[in-house]
Image: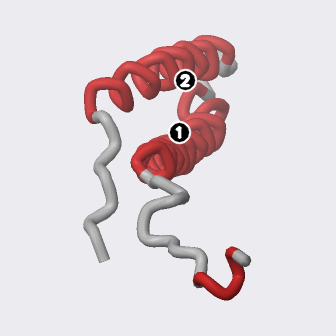
Amino acid sequence: MEPMPRLNRDAYIAVMRQQVEAMLGQVADAINNAKDGEIIAGSECQVRDLFGTLRQKAYEVGLQMRTDAAEAAFSPSAGRRVPEEAAE
């Protein structure tokens, strides 16, 4: 079995950079929108959930990009031979 092609690291970082920046904006909003005197209690769970969603998205995007790279490298006709009997 041939090794699976790797994902393009720079392309992955570019895609995820957009995700990270958007999420960090949401973190800032959660902190700013928490009530005075309750900043931690009012934002901690939301921030935790945002980072959890980002972690999941980062992994999913990486897996999909690696799968896409493998599919792009796959030649459906390579290694397949039609038996002579079936060709008739």
Question: Is residue 3 placed above or below 6 in the rendered structure?
Answer: below
**Which residue matches tag 2?**
23
* Position of the C terminus by quadrant: bottom right
Q: Secondary structure at mark 2?
A: helix
Q: Residue furthest front?
A: 88
The image's mark for residue 54 is 1
- Judge from the rendering whether residue 31 lies leftward or rightward of residue 62; answer left or right: right
Q: Is residue 60 above or below residue 28?
A: below
Q: Amino acid at mark 1?
A: Leu
The answer to whether residue 70 shows anywhere in this view is yes
Left or right relative to 25: residue 78: left
Query: Residue 7, position in %: x, y?
Result: 34, 43
Q: Is residue 47 above or below residue 82?
A: above
Name which residue lies at 53% across and 47% down: 64
Q: Would you say the residues marked 2 and 1 are in contact, meaning their CB atoms lie under 8 Å apart?
A: yes
- At 50% from the left and 50% from the top, the residue drawn is 71
- Residue depicted at x 65% and y 37%: 46
